[in-house]
Image (cartoon, grey):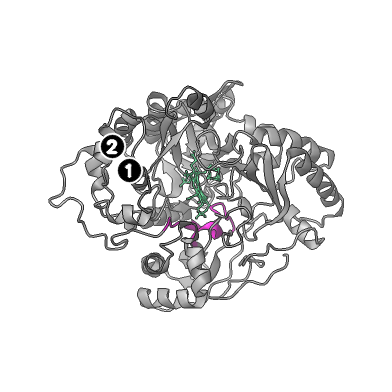
């Protein structure tokens, strides 16, 4: 049976209602129908099945072990201790006893079965959170720099993330009707979607707000990036605007490529909403609605030309962009341990294993430990886009108590043991829940670290920060194409090895090993790390070194790699190749 296209489903969904209410009530299957599986994404949930159990269930002629992933909308990644406790209770009551910090600063909960979905959504709302447009062809969770040092600026950036998220939330009341039993609007399904229109966007759209010198949100991986520019007094003067970032690619299909966003100009704070809305509506109107794989803003920009897209954005926004301001990024990682914010409060960044918070059988009761912290913590929790957590806003007098809990529950194991590469490594979820995974990522990271760390030790590089990212498939949820070393799943136990991204998330890396095994990856990396250890210049990072000595060049697709962090670049300008 052929299914309708996603475009048809969206248009005919009566503003994202579809037949979801009926589908949820059908007790004969743990699955939703094809259309409802598409519609539910806009409500922040994906139908999945436990892939570890697939073969066995097939042998037993059972339907797959259907379950749902739920993603919270959390602009800027800030949660109160009460919200944390609410999520913890949901994870232990309705889900798989774990919380998963994502690369977009929020939580995913896995393993919710269909008959529990509604109760879980209601519990999320009761804990003062929602999941609206956490997935689907709309604006997704807005990232906001989580750098804890500049507390005042952080608050402002968080506010921007909140406001942008609220502004681009779909207008439909479907979510409230379906999950919270709110009364149906008079003519249910005909609400006006002033920004999205009848068919929403051709594809997902992502916004991030970065505050130099930290690019912890990987601003260039977003459809729309806002780079905060401060005036001479340290006040927010406005934002440089970058467009067309995206990571998704396909193995062997050159038309599907990752792209680093290009900087097109500068806007004042008053102009932000107009330019963001212009970008989104240009993509709404020009984006490819025939081929979903080619439907992201990055392809719209490359197909029509950056100049045309920028002109259209300016026309719709009603002003011309000013020239981009100079800015400089230092790195795209998190800073671990305690730091004092300018408000005199303290912030503790803890490295989490691929963002997974569970009570691990090896003696790391991370879920319990963070629950105990949430019970006494008076500040907030901030998720980072590198899947880590900041226990933020701790009064000096409370530090000892938090430290004691951190030690008691082994929350410092990732931070104290291991190498700099391990602390900052990012791996996507992949197996067993992700339907698209071709190889392990989150579950493989510890194994890979166990082979790479001795190599780093051998070459005296244990404390050298190197950006390592693993994705289970070329969709790139760990933003691997911006890493200095990236493994991208091809098949069980086999990866594509990419090298040469930079430590600031400003240059795409290049394929150096196609469909190779762990042994081949190690054999490739060992001599390169050795050369790096002996030939690097002072302060030179691994990816930059590989470019300088000619081991890698820029990739063959239009990279738009930004090679000079100190240059504000102008609209439409293709970035030259070369290394920093
Ligand atoms: Fe992603 C699809 C997980 C961040 C690019 N992503 C998926 C799905 C929903 C698989 C699916 O479609 O069936 C994954 C669910 C796995 C699971 O079992 O939970 C999934 N993506 C994730 C998360 C949880 C990865 C993580 O380990 O943290 C991240 C959740 C973010 C969030 O909270 O909103 C996540 N995904 C990203 C990022 C990184 C980012 O946004 O900064 C990217 C690359 C940036 C980009 O969008 O280009 C990303 N995910 C994709 C793509 C490729 C999209 C494309 O246009 O090419 C897919 C596939 C798709 O949409 O068809 C995808
Ligand atoms: Fe799944 Fe691929 Fe994303 Fe990993 S990169 S979570 S395998 S879609």
User: Callout 2: 10 Å neighbours few (<14), some, many (20+)?
Assistant: some
Left or right: residue 116 versus residue 540 is left
The residue at which mark 1 appears reads as 36
Q: Residue at x 73, y 40 (%)?
A: 517
Position of residue 569 in the picture relative to residue 80 (left or right)? right
| Residue 570, quarter of the rendered image | bottom right
Residue 240 in view of the camera: no
Asked where in the image residue 331 lies, by quadrant, the reply is bottom right
Displayed quadrant of residue 272: bottom left
- The residue wearing badge 2 is 23
Q: Position of residue 340 (x, y in %)?
A: 55, 44
User: Which residue occupies the foreground of this view, 513 or 382?
Assistant: 513
Density class for disc 1 (Cα within 10 Å; few <14, some 14-19, many ≥20) is many
Figure check: 556 above or below 37: below
Q: Secondary structure at mark 1?
A: helix
Residue at disc 2, secondary structure: helix
Residue under the image location 39 percent in, 50 percent down: 136
Q: CA distance from mark 1 to mark 2?
A: 7 Å
Tag 1 and tag 2, C-beta contact below 8 Å: yes
Residue 19 lies in magenta, yes or no? no
Look at the picture and state if 233 lies above or below 525: below
The magenta stretch is 203-226
Q: Relative to residue 529, is residue 113 drawn left or right?
A: left
Split into quadrants, the picture shows ligand 2 in the one at top right
Residue 205 belongs to magenta span: yes
């Amino acid at each position: 049976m052929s299914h309708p296209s996603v475009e048809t489903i969206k248009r005919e969904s009566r503003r994202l209602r579809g037949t979801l209410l009926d589908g949820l009530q059908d007790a004969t299957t743990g699955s939703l129908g094809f259309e409802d599986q598409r519609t539910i994404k806009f409500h922040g949930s994906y139908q999945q099945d436990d892939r570890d159990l697939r073969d066995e269930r097939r042998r037993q002629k059972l339907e797959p072990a259907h379950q749902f992933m739920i993603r919270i909308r959390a602009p800027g990644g800030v949660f109160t201790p009460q919200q944390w406790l609410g999520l913890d209770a949901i994870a232990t009551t309705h889900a798989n006893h774990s919380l998963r910090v994502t690369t977009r600063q929020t939580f995913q909960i896995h393993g919710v079965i269909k008959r529990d979905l509604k109760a879980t959504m209601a519990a999320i709302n009761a804990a003062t959170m929602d999941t609206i447009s956490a997935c689907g062809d709309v604006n997704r969770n807005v990232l906001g720099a989580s750098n804890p040092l500049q507390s005042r600026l952080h608050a402002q950036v968080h506010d921007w993330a909140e406001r942008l998220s609220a502004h681009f939330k779909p207008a439909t009341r479907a979510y409230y009707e379906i999950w919270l039993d709110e009364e149906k609007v008079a003519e249910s399904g005909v609400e006006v979607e002033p920004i999205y229109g009848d068919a929403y966007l051709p594809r997902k759209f992502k916004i991030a707000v970065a505050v130099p010198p930290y690019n912890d949100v990987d601003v260039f991986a977003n459809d729309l990036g806002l780079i905060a520019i401060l005036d001479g007094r340290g006040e927010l003067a406005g934002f440089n605007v970058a467009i067309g970032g995206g990571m998704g690619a396909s193995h062997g299909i050159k038309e599907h490529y990752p792209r680093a966003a290009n900087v097109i100009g500068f806007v004042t704070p008053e102009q932000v909403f107009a330019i963001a809305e212009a970008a989104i509506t240009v993509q709404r109107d020009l984006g490819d609605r025939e081929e979903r794989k080619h439907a992201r803003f990055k392809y719209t920009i490359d197909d029509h030309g950056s100049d045309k897209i920028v002109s259209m954005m300016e026309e719709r926004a009603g002003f011309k962009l000013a020239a981009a301001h100079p800015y400089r990024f230092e790195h795209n990682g998190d800073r671990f341990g305690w730091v004092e914010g300018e408000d005199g409060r303290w912030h503790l960044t803890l490295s989490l294993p691929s963002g997974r918070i569970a009570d691990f059988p090896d003696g790391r009761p991370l879920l319990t430990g963070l629950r105990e912290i949430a019970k006494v913590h008076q500040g907030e929790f901030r998720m980072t886009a590198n899947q880590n957590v900041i226990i933020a806003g701790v009064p000096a007098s409370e530090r000892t108590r938090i430290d004691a809990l951190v030690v008691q529950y082994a929350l410092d194991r990732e931070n104290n043991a291991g190498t700099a590469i391990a602390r900052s490594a990012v791996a996507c979820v992949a197996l067993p829940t992700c339907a698209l995974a071709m190889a392990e990522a989150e579950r493989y990271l510890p194994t890979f670290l166990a082979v790479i760390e001795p190599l780093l030790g051998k070459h005296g590089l244990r404390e050298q920060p190197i950006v390592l990212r693993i994705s289970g498939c070329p969709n790139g949820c760990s933003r691997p194409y911006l890493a200095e070393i990236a493994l991208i799943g091809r098949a069980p136990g086999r990866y594509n090895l990419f090298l040469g991204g930079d430590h600031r998330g400003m240059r795409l890396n290049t394929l150096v090993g196609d469909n190779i095994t762990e042994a081949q990856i190690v054999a490739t990396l060992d001599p390169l790390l050795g050369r790096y250890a002996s030939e690097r210049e002072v302060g030179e990072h691994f990816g930059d070194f590989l470019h300088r000595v000619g081991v890698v060049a820029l990739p063959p697709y239009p990279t738009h790699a930004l090679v000079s962090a100190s240059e504000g670049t102008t609209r439409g300008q293709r970035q030259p190749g070369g290394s920093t």
